[in-house]
Image (spheres, rainbow, N blue to C red):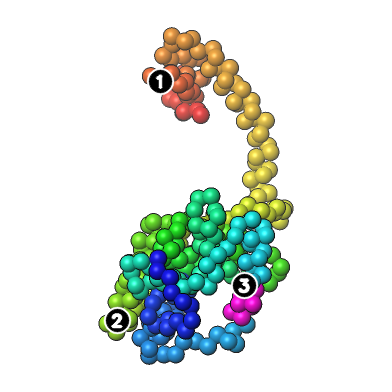
Amino acid sequence: MLSQPNAKLDRRLFIGGSDARVIMGTDEAALVRLWQEKRGEAEPQDLSRDLLVQLGSVTEDLNRRWFEQETKHTISQVQRHLRHPSLSFMAVTLDGLVQDHPSGPAVYEAKFMLPFSFSEEAAAAKHMAQLQHAMLVTGTRRAFLSIITGGGKWVLVEVEADPVYQTVLLQVERIFWRCVQQGEVPRPFGAEPPRAKVAAVRVVDMSSSNAWAEWASLFVSTRAAHAEHESARAELKGLVPEDAREAFGHGVRARRSRAGAVSFELLSNGGGSHAHVQ
């Protein structure tokens, strides 16, 4: 990766991480506007009065300090602009780089999100293209999405590099950049993002879920029968003579495989038909 000063960057000259999210998304109007901006046919959007963007900006330092405090990792390369070593149209301005992770350097991305209808899965999907783009540019295999919500909650999502998704991402970005250079209007691609690893940190009360209630009731009512079934299976297995390839009686047949594993079948109508039993 090639490092450049971050002063007065001309975003028309490259595809950045936030651009990747638009390019891989389904919003055609946003895609065309981005294309116009890259071609110099439209001015970049003024985000100075976008409150959500500004909240993200003013909480970046807090987010970084909280991440370091909670994970014991150190963040470096803050706001460093990097170019892909061989694809000059790909670049990223880092929120940071985690250099001391046991598995190697990792991208750090800080976000502020509203608490309404917030979910870790939706947040990861929304920013997946940006994270995979950053990993491609930096040559890293892992990224951390550090989120502070307006509800006073901190969420950490760990994302691994996905070679299949990155191959698609790279191809779509190539097509978009060719459209920028040749003047052809791009069309949305809308690739399905891979699922991220979300840290299991919540304790959830499922009492209000009707589905949970239905399956929990079945689980409880069949627990004793399941235990008896497993006990009977073990006893029957122990009764099968070691030199027997097959044993049957009282509606049950046992078969021994060439590898020595014993499986059971239910017999009916005097043994004429049967069903496999696990």
Residue pictured at 60% horizontal, 60% vertical = 74
Amino acid at dot 1: Ala
Q: Tell me where residue 67 sits by quadrant.
A: bottom right
Residue 114 visible in this rendered orientation of the protein: no
Could you say whether the residue bearing mark 2 is in a helix, strand or loop? helix
Q: Please give the residue where the numbered disc 3 appears in the rendered image.
A: 60
Whether the magenta-drawn stretch holds residue 21 is answered as no
**Where does the image place residue 241, in percent across and percent down from the top left?**
48, 9
**Where does the image place residue 272, in percent across and percent down from the top left?**
42, 21
Q: Is tag 1's residue or tag 3's residue first in the polypeptide sequence?
A: 3
Secondary structure of the magenta portion, mostly?
helix
- 84 relative to 220, above or below: below
Residue pictured at 47% horizontal, 10% vertical = 242
Residue pictured at 54% horizontal, 53% vertical = 101
Residue range corresponding to the magenta coloring: 52-59
Q: Nearer the viewer, mark 2 or mark 3?
A: 3
